[in-house]
């Protein structure tokens, strides 16, 4: 069994690379031993959201459910609107909010930009 064959596991397993890469950069830049868990989870959830958008774009580009299912098994049970409007961006926002409250209240200023990106992406549907 491959993780790419299961719709939600595909996205979660592909996006796990994001916090790993962020941790590598974290270790290069700072002498703190580990990045905060809230930041890592936020980065993972935002990465999941962008991976869902990537899968959604692939599915729309193929434009034939049978060909899409042959291309990627998780597309056999693909429901585009449900995947794009999932709770992944909300999870990313919640963990990013926890990080902001703990480590830098001025980071709250990033929320309007995040909301704008989320809003513009949801209008594509």
Image: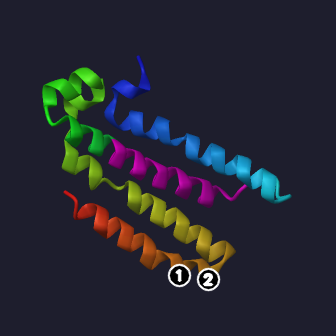
| Residue at (26% x, 62% y) in the render | 122
Q: Residue furthest top?
A: 1
Residues marked 2 and 1 touching at CB (< 8 Å): yes
Q: Position of residue 96 (x, y in %)?
A: 54, 66
Q: Quadrant of the N terminus?
A: top left
Q: Is residue 54 left or right of residue 32?
A: left
Magenta-tinted stretch? 35-54
Q: Which mark is residue 59?
A: none
* Residue 16 as seen in the image, left or right of residue 9: right
Splitting the image into 4 quarters, where does residue 3 fall?
top left
Residue 82 position within the rendered picture, expressed as x and y whole percent measured from the top left: 22, 49
Q: Secondary structure at mark 1?
A: helix
Query: Residue tagged by mark 1?
Result: 109
Local secondary structure at mark 2: helix
Left or right: residue 52 versus residue 59 is right
Q: Which residue sits at x=44%, y=59%?
A: 91
Q: Is residue 34 visible?
A: no
Between 58 and 13, the residue placed more toward the observer is 58
Quarter of the image containing the C terminus? Answer: bottom left
Residue 113 in magenta stretch = no
Along the line of sight, the residue nearer the viewer: 19 or 25: 25
> What is the magenta segment's predominant secondary structure?
helix
Residue 46 lies, with reference to residue 107, above or below; the image says above
User: Residue, x 65% and y 51% (percent of image)?
Assistant: 22
Image quadrant in which you'd find residue 58: top left
Q: Where residue 76 sits: x, y (%)?
A: 21, 28
- Give residue 106's mark: 2
């Amino acid at each position: 069994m491959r993780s790419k064959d299961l719709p939600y596991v595909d996205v979660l397993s592909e996006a796990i690379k994001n916090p790993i890469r962020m941790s590598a950069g974290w270790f290069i830049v700072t002498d703190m031993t580990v990045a905060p868990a809230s930041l890592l989870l936020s980065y993972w959830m935002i990465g999941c959201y962008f991976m869902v958008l990537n899968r959604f774009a692939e599915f729309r580009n193929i434009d034939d459910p049978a060909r899409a299912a042959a291309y990627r098994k998780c597309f056999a049970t693909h429901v585009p609107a449900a995947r794009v409007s999932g709770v992944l961006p909300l999870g990313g926002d919640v963990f990013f909010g926890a990080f902001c409250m703990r480590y830098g209240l001025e980071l709250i200023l990033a929320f309007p930009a995040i909301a704008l990106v989320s809003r513009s992406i949801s209008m594509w549907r």
